[in-house]
């Protein structure tokens, strides 16, 4: 029987030395993750966050959203379903090329579903259409109707559905309750931005006090409130938190997974590992569990057959700079030798097309200026500003043990 072997494996967040598992061919890698990385919060239609207009750090998300200056009209981009679907498709491709085997998309339901149909091979996708009491955004009734309309398209083992309340400020009690009831009735996860620079725990608990059986809730950011106390899971987004507010959660307490927020702008979670390790030194095992299996547990998704393999050692992978050679989703090879099996595209091809689409959007729905799409270098620069890449002593942090013939 052929085997995959690796110098180091990260299996369900646990580091093992000398990984050897049954495989479809004999192959060796330096580092293998089983499952791959989970990215539990991504806005696939965002290609302009107003980063080039930033003069200082914002205090919270509401201040940032009110005061940022954008080059494009976000409403027009959302209403252009074809364009929004193209952006979502590019985000899916980028994610899996960077080693993400599960990603959660907020935003436009029809566009994100269309992207899945265009690129069905991976990563696993959690659809979380955004609900908000603003013109052009969905209501709980809209989402319920659309899920019923597209029922035959979402009967996909790589797809899970849910709902996303944008925030407590921009979703009143009626919308919030409708979202909770929709999620509970459909046994779906409910996500929302929460406590992103301002404490909202009291109001959140007050709104939930009228709900008999709340659904599984994945709160995003939770910078200023303890997720454990609120009884929610937490997707922390260290990269966007540091870029916007120069701070993130002080500890990993209550954090269950990590999100990238803006995959088009700064890459996905694997590219942020250096920053995460710098913010939470000496927590390697906790970081790896959250960055891999954590997202699957957040959304109740199977990770059977998901794998990411690198020709780089674990220390190098943890800088966020290498990209994987092999990515498997549900037992199927999606990326081989760093290239998408389905389309033949490499990461640089996807990045190039994203820049071209960004330029087009700026011309058609903006002021003619292409929005800033900085790439993950922005995140790596933050790490340098914090004193450079962290030093990781695997022998001290973990007792490495052999893992022979584990079932995959």
Image (tube, rainbow, N blue to C red):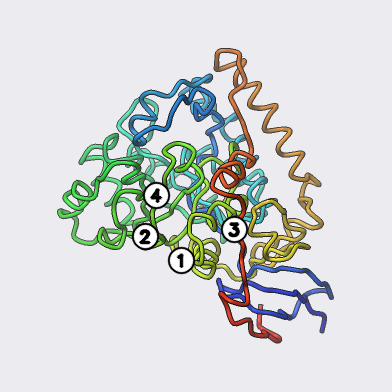
Of the numbered discs in the image, which one, if any, rests on residue 297?
A: 1
**In this view of the protein, which residue sits in the foreground, 1 or 320?**
320
Tell me if mark 3 has few (under 14), some (14-19) or many (20+) residues whose alpha carbon lies within 10 angstroms of its own: many
Mark 1, residues whose alpha carbon is within 10 Å: few (<14), some, or many (≥20)? some
Residue 233, numbered circle: 2
Horizontal and vertical percent for residue 248?
Answer: 42, 48
**Residue 97 position in % (x across, y down):** 70, 51
The secondary structure type at the circle numbered 2 is strand
Q: Secondary structure at mark 4?
A: strand
Query: Label 3 belongs to which residue?
Result: 390
State the residue position of label 4.
Answer: 220
Mark 2 to mark 4: distance in Å? Answer: 9 Å
Q: CA distance from mark 2 to mark 3?
A: 27 Å
Q: Nearer the viewer, mark 2 or mark 1?
A: 2
Callout 2 touching callout 1 (CB < 8 Å): yes
> Quick one: quadrant of the N terminus?
bottom right
Counting residues from the start of the chain, the first of labels 1 and 3 encountered is: 1
Q: Is residue 13 above or below residue 117?
A: below
């Amino acid at each position: 029987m052929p085997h995959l072997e690796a110098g180091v494996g990260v299996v369900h967040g646990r580091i093992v030395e000398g990984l050897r598992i049954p495989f479809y061919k004999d192959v060796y890698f330096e580092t293998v993750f089983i499952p791959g990385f989970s990215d539990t919060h991504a806005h696939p239609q965002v290609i302009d966050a107003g980063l080039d207009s930033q003069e200082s750090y914002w205090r919270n998300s509401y201040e940032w959203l009110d005061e940022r200056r954008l080059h494009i009209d976000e409403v027009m981009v959302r209403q252009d379903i074809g364009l929004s679907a193209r952006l979502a498709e590019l985000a899916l491709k980028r994610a899996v090329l960077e080693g993400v085997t599960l990603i959660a998309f907020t935003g436009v339901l029809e566009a994100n579903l269309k992207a899945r149909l265009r690129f069905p091979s991976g990563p696993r996708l959690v659809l979380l259409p955004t609900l908000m009491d603003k013109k052009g955004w969905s209501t709980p009734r809209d989402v319920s109707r659309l899920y019923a309309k597209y029922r035959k398209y979402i009967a996909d083992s790589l797809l899970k559905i849910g709902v996303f309340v944008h925030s407590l400020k921009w979703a009143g009690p009626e919308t919030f309750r409708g979202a909770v009831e929709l999620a509970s009735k459909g046994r779906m996860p409910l996500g929302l931005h929460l406590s992103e620079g301002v404490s909202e725990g009291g109001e959140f608990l007050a709104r939930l006090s009228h709900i008999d059986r709340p659904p599984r809730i994945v709160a995003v950011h939770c910078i200023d409130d303890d997720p454990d106390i609120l009884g929610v899971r937490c997707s922390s987004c260290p990269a966007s938190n540091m870029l916007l507010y120069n701070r993130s959660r002080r500890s990993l307490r209550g954090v269950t997974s990590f999100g990238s927020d803006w995959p088009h702008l700064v890459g996905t979670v694997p590219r942020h590992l250096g920053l995460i390790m710098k913010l939470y030194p000496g927590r390697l095992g906790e970081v790896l569990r959250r960055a891999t299996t954590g997202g699957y547990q957040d959304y109740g998704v199977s990770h059977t057959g998901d794998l990411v393999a690198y020709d780089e050692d674990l220390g190098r992978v943890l800088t966020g700079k290498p990209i994987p050679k092999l990515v498997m989703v549900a037992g199927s090879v999606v990326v081989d030798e760093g290239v998408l099996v389905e389309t033949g595209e490499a990461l640089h091809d996807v990045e190039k097309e994203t820049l071209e689409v960004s330029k087009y959007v700026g011309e058609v729905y903006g002021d003619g200026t292409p929005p800033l799409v900085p790439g993950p270098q922005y995140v790596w620069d933050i790490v340098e500003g914090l004193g450079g890449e962290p030093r990781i002593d695997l022998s001290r942090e973990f007792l490495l043990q052999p893992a022979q013939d584990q079932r995959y």
